[in-house]
Image: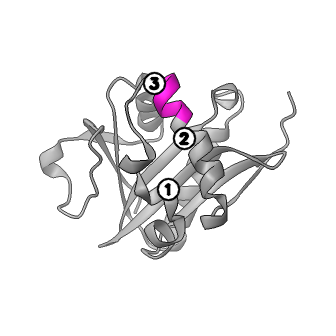
Amino acid sequence: MDTSFTIRLLNNSHCQQIIDLILPIQQIEFNEPVTINDQPDLLDIDSNYYKTGGCFWGIIRNGEVIGTIALIANGHQTGTIRKMFVKKEFRGKESGLAQQLMETLKAYCAKHQICHLYLGTADFLKAACRFYERNGFQVTAPADLPTYFPRMEIDNLFYYLKLC
């Protein structure tokens, strides 16, 4: 397998490629009845991520987006991780791509004094849960989420990580 790739910032010019990566993973691989209408943030990356002081990164391989991670800056030195996806054939510890995305996001947080990270996921995504836990995230109760945490309907498990 060709392992050459780059992690770079994505923007509105990449919306269709991001959608083409994420929707099949959600709909086909995980059988979730989610559509683009449920995630309008994917149609305007610039406003929904950069405007808040966050970012949206992608792994690019041969011109194709094969992985993503995004950060919404919520203020209060707090961020929300969103859109953590890696194409199936590039997942796992062997490739290390998800870990590199996470390290990129954490480095951005350190540089921008974002000390508290939250994320929501679905409890049936066992590999994702193990990944977050390996990265130091702790399960947190929904009642303990900040009021400004942007919840998604599918999420039923929430994580928190203190960075600084």
The numbered mark, 2 or 3, whose residue comes first in the sequence reads 2
Q: Quadrant of residue 92?
A: top right
- Classify 158 as above or below 29: below
Query: What's the residue at 52%, 64% (across, down)?
Result: 45
How many numbered discs sit on the rendered protein? Answer: 3
User: Which type of secondary structure does the marked residue at label 1 adopt?
Assistant: helix
Q: CA distance from mark 3 to mark 1?
A: 19 Å
Q: What secondary structure prevails in the magenta region?
A: helix
Q: CA distance from mark 1 to mark 2?
A: 9 Å
On residue 30, which mark appears?
Answer: 3
Image marks 1 and 2: residues in contact by CB distance under 8 Å: yes
On residue 22, which mark appears?
Answer: 2
Q: Mark 1 is on which residue type?
A: Leu
Instruction: Give the magenta range.
Output: 24-29
Task: Tell me where residue 109 appears, x and y as whole percent.
Answer: 49, 65
Image marks 3 and 1: residues in contact by CB distance under 8 Å: no
User: Which type of secondary structure does the marked residue at label 3 adopt?
Assistant: loop
